Amino acid sequence: MDSNEKAVVYVRLKEGVLDPQGLTIHKALLQMGYSDFLSVRSGRFFELEINSECADIDRKIGEVCSRLLSNPVIEEFTVERIR
Amino acid sequence: MKVGVVTFPGSNCDYDAYAAVKSVLKEDVEFLWHKSTDLCGSDMVILPGGFSYGDYLRAGAIARFSPLMEEIVRFAHSGGMVMGVCNGFQVLTECGLLPGALMRNSHLRFCCKYVYLRVENNGSRFTGACRPGEILRIPIAHGEGNYYYFEDDIRRLEDNGQVVFRYVDRDGRVNDEANPNGSANNIAGIINREGNVLGMMPHPERAVEDLLGSADGLRVFESVRTACSAIAEAGGN
């Protein structure tokens, strides 16, 4: 088992941006009879294993999230750190 | 005129673009490898269609960090002409040379067919050979061509004449049926504010001879040639 700290990055479309994938999944849920789910938004996540000796890891995580992992025009991200 | 055609791993329209310039336009053309940093004296650079880096992460998201792209961004900022088709358009929005973003088609399907485009601004360097409002028949082939930008920004693009191509029906009418991917305002192609960078989802390089089904795409290449010779006469960018 590895013990390095991880950053889990969740990327999702900004509120108000149409998410056809989420809509299609929601439609499928309704067809399956699950009428209690009022909407679905889709997204993706990334697990980044962190070098424990890095001094300014917070800045670097923020950088890769906005430069590569998300497209700031349409997406937003949240980061969760796990040990 | 010399045209540089970029090859990323996964590009698949680079040879079509090369052939359009070489055999039909009969101009000088060279492939530019994504790891190189040399634009080989190109007057215009084409970012071709395809699936650069397998479309991993987001279409165009990884290609934008290739060494050659840094050079192309510099080239564009100094006034050089850059044209992105399909995946090339996606790369241009990802690297910030063009505004907005290209999202999954609203119906979630890959869409491959001929569409009709209306030329909305024939004063650009990429459309100068077109008549105002001319209808072009050019094929599309993409899964992520749904042009998105915020409402106010779209309005600004429209006001600035940056929307150069719009999806229309055969008679030139803008409607939902003619919109193959859900793009805002049926937008099929835009230029940057300065007018030296074009992005379009349809493939003009696939429509350069009647034998291919249409020669309407040639208009774009002819426009570019005229613009390039005008720039050369004026003594560079």
Image: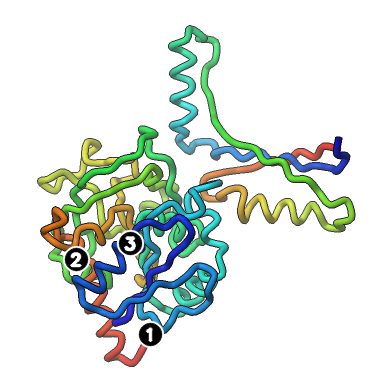
Q: Residue at x 50, y 56 (%)?
A: B94
Left or right of residue A66, residue A56 in this image: right
Of circles 2 and 1, which is in front?
A: 2
Vertical relation: B184 (above or below) B26: above
Looking at the image, is mark 1 or mark 3 earlier in the sequence?
3
CA–CA distance in space, label 2 to label 1:
24 Å
* Residue at (20, 61) in percent of width and height: B217
- Secondary structure beneath disc 3? loop
Nearest the eye: B209 or A43: B209
Disc 1 target residue: B237
Secondary structure beneath label 2: helix
| Residue B158 in view in this figure | no
Q: Kindly report the distance in space between the C-alpha atoms of the residues bearing marks 3 and 2.
A: 21 Å
Residue shown at the point (51%, 61%) measured from the top left = B95
Q: Amino acid at mark 2?
A: Leu
Q: Nearer the viewer, residue B12 or B218?
A: B12
Count of numbered badges drawn on the protein: 3
Q: Which amino acid type is marked by label 3?
A: Gln
Chain to which the residue tagged by mark 2 belongs? B
Residue identified by numbered label 2: B218
Name the N-terminal-most of marks 2 and 1.
2
